[in-house]
Amino acid sequence: MKYSDLGLPLDLGAGVLRSGQFLINGGASVITTGLQPGFFVCPFAGTITGVTLIANTSGSIQLDVWKAATGNIPTSANTIVASDPPKLSTAQQSTETTLTGWTTTVSVGDVFAISVTSVSGISSLSVSLAITAT
């Protein structure tokens, strides 16, 4: 099967918007704070151009996004969000494209992680980092 058989664009190179996805699931309970299970390894170079959060219900949550070079596991020392963390404030969905102070450059093999810094009333959250390939 080819990409064209799936209706996908043939050009997956520079300038194409892609995304890195995380799903944070607390099951029947509110999501816990701290580092969340799972990592995303970016297979292409690019620039982060936005972040979208979608929760299972209206609530509040604030995240930290960590990024480390290939071969390393990111820690809190590797935060990329500066003083503008992704968040929901008594809402179910949010998209941010003004990433003030963020480190937005992505290299092939960069490893991403998500840490929840605060949460109220949300048991499931989808996090999508919009990354434009370079």
Image (cartoon, helix red, strand yellow):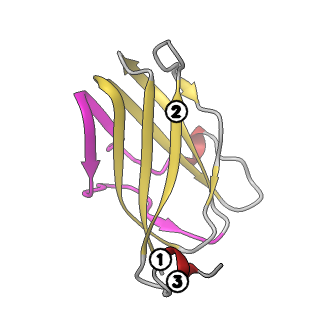
In the picture, the disc for residue 8 is 1
Relative image position of residue 85 (x, y in whole percent)? 36, 41
Location of residue 91 by image quarter = top left
- Indicate the position of residue 60 as horizontal and vertical percent values: 30, 24
For residue 24, which numbered disc appears in the image?
2
**Residue furthest right as drawn:** 71
- Look at the numbered discs 1 and 2 and tell me whether their residues touch, using CB distance below 8 Å: no
Looking at the rendered image, the disc whose residue lies closer to the viewer, 3 or 2, is 3
The reply to whether callout 3 and callout 1 are in contact (CB within 8 Å) is yes
Disc 1 crowd rating (10 Å Cα; few below 14, some 14-19, many 20+) is few
Identify the residue at image location x=72%, y=62%. Answer: 70
Residue 14 drawn above or below residue 107: below
User: Residue shown at 48%/87% (left/top)?
Assistant: 11
**What is the three-letter code of the residue carrying label 1?**
Leu
* Residue drawn at point x = 44 percent, y = 44 percent: 127
Residue 101 part of the magenta-drawn span: yes
Reply above or below: 68 against 13. Answer: above
What numbered label is drawn on residue 4? 3
* Stretch of the chain drawn in magenta: 79-108
| Res. 18 image quadrant | bottom left
With 26 as the anchor, is 101 left or right in this view? left
Q: CA distance from mark 1 to mark 2?
A: 27 Å
Whole-percent x, y for residue 19 in the image: 46, 61
Give the residue displayed 52% in from the left and 32% down from the top: 24
In this rendering, the label closer to the viewer, 1 or 2: 1
Q: CA distance from mark 3 to mark 2?
A: 32 Å
Secondary element at tag 3: helix
